[in-house]
Amino acid sequence: MTHETVTLAWVVETPGPMASAPLRRVRREVPPPGDEELLIEVHACGVCRTDLHLAEGDLPPRRPRCTPGHEIVGRVLAAGTAVRDFRPGERVGAAWLAGTCGVCPYCRSGRENLCPESRYTGWDIHGGYAGHTVVDARYVYPLPEGWPEDELAPLLCAGIIGYRALLRAELPPGGRLGLYGYGASAHLTAQLAVAQGATVHVLTRGEDAQRLALELGAASAGPATASPPEPLDAAILFAPAGELVPVALTALDRGGTLSIAGIHLSDIPSLNYARHLFQERTVRSVTANTRADGRAYLAEAARVRPRVHVQRYGMAQADRALTDLATGKVNGVAVLLPD
């Protein structure tokens, strides 16, 4: 089967602040898919804060001039000879986790997200800020028809990582959940928690985000440094702001858990044991996700059908989308669509 050989793609040329224009759009050769790979035509790609961390150098580059983007929705153009689960024309999604070794103790015990050899889309391999990309079919999800592509794309990272963060928070049934930060992941996680019977309190900067939280079912919404109206059984920190860790811990009830969802976090201030941790309060990090998490979340999303608040950009506007994200101008989630 013939396949695309050249694509337009954004690359991280020189990591730095978005004002320094770290991204560049280039024409890049597209290799044919390997035996276990798929060539995908990109129909939508979500813009994640992790992409911003990579562009600005908060996360060190792993591959020179790598193409960002790991919330990819598209169609299979070609499949490798060993691929059995996907055929050309099928709708698929590629997410953050792009590969693991499969043999280490973490992989063998169902914790592949902790694999020391794990690889990531848009960090180790070229991602979805492009017309086409090649990915390992074993880390690809089948996606349903009849769901807008720009609404599906954010589910593949914002949704999945929020789902894992919610699991890590160990929210009891009918519990009180606090969400610190209300961007792409939080606005999906909040809807899932509400559908599961939780009372959700949102603490975030920005009146637009607060209004959106209330529209989507939050019981309250206020500034990030404010106290919620009642003690929390669990909290998730989505904002990459270490100074909010003691704030969130203070808001927890006895035995509560704070789950930190981001891959990057600024330094955490000193904690006071009696005020922040005593009475069996817990802090837990979240590291990527397993494919089982992805399958479970996508099944839940199909049941709940969350409202995805999308700001659409053409693929040629990827640098603007990341700049808007950096400056707090994205309310909900930004998604890139073909020009």
Image: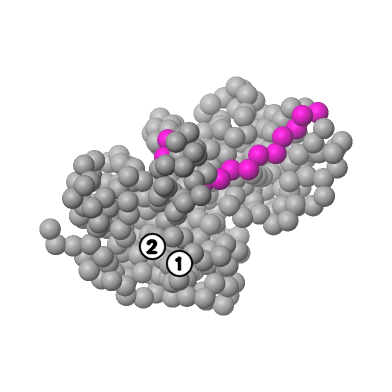
Residue 70: x and y in percent read 43, 54
Place of residue 204 in the rendered image (x, y in percent of width and height, measured from the top left): 67, 48
Tell me the SS state at disc 2.
Answer: loop
Using the image as rendered, state which of residue 117 and residue 125 is in the foreground: 117
Magenta stretch contains residue 290: yes
Residue 15: which quarter of the image? bottom right
Per the rendered image, the range of residues in magenta is: 279-292
Q: Residue furthest left?
A: 1
Which numbered disc, 1 or 2, marks the residue closer to the eye?
1
How was this image coloured? Answer: one colour
Which residue type does callout 2 highlight? Answer: His
- Quarter assignment of residue 326: bottom right
Q: Is residue 37 above or below residue 297?
A: below
Quadrant in the picture for the N terminus = bottom left
Which mark is drawn over residue 247? none
Where is 127 relative to 15, above or below? above
The amino acid beneath tag 1 is Arg
Q: Is residue 3 visible?
A: yes
Residue at figure coordinates x 52%, y 44% from the top left: 114
Report which residue position mark 2 lands on: 126
Discs 1, 2 touching: Cβ within 8 Å: yes
* SS category of the residue bearing label 1: loop
* Residue drawn at 51 percent across, 49 percent down: 116
- Which residue is at a point 72% across and 52% down the rendered structure image? 242
Residue wearing tag 1: 63
Instruction: Inspect this view and state whether residue 89 appears.
Output: no
Which is nearer the eye, 325 or 120? 120
